[in-house]
Every structure is written in C-alpha cells, then in structure tokens.
Amino acid sequence: MGQSAYQLNCCLLLVFRVLKAVAVELGNAERAAQVQKVGGAQISRLQAQHTQVRFLMAKDEGHGYQKKPNRDNRFYATDAFLEANLLGGFQ
C-alpha cells in the first residue's frame, strides 16, 4: 500500500469518532488534489453517519486562502458556523 493510500485509509478509519458538526475548507488548485481526495472521502463518510458538515471551497486557491475576497468569505462562513454550532444561535 502506497503512502497516500495509507494516509487516506487512516483518515477514513477515524471519521466514526466525529460526533459534532465539522467545517471543511479546501482550495481547488492542482496541488491540493490529494487533500481534496481525502477531504471528499471524509465528507462522504461524515454525511453518511448524519454528521453536519459545512464545506467551503475556493475554486481559485490552493493551500490556504490568499485572495482577499476568499479570506473574507471564509471569515464570515466560519463566524456563522461557530455561532450556529458553539453558541447555539445565541448572540
């Protein structure tokens, strides 16, 4: 089994431990392809076990969000996620 297949299997085997809502943020550049593969498989498993998943992908980014509009979008999406899942919608 190659290193990437090993990493993918390890990540997928631990998904059953996740019981709370999850936020996933990815870029879409070619260099992030392995991260997307693992992330996509994890998201599918989480959704299959009825775990709430918030998925955010910047199609014009790689690893990290460098462009200001993407960083702003990420900030507001993260704020809304935390408010809904940690504060229970209270302000």
Image (cartoon, rainbow, N blue to C red):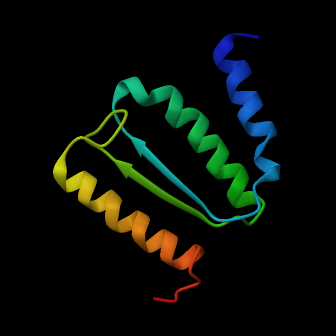
Image location of residue 50, percent across then percent down: 74, 66
Q: Quadrant of the C terminus?
A: bottom left
In the displayed structure, 28 sits above or below 72; it is: above
In the displayed structure, 87 sits above or below 45; it is: below
Query: Is residue 18 shown left or right of residue 21?
Result: right
Q: Nearer the viewer, residue 14 or 41?
A: 14
Q: Residue at x 33, y 33 (%)?
A: 62
Q: Residue at x 46, y 28 (%)?
A: 33
Numbered circles on residues, count: 0
Image location of residue 51, percent across then percent down: 71, 64
Query: Is residue 29 shown left or right of residue 17?
Result: left
Q: Nearer the viewer, residue 32 or 74?
A: 74
Image location of residue 87, percent across then percent down: 56, 80
Quadrant position of residue 27: top left
Extreme residue in the top direction: 2
Query: Is residue 52 shown left or right of residue 15?
Result: left
Q: Residue at x 67, y 12 (%)?
A: 3
In the displayed structure, 84 sits above or below 57; it is: below
Extreme residue in the bottom direction: 90
Image location of residue 71, percent across then percent down: 26, 53
In the displayed structure, 33 sits above or below 54; it is: above
Q: Quadrant of the N terminus?
A: top right
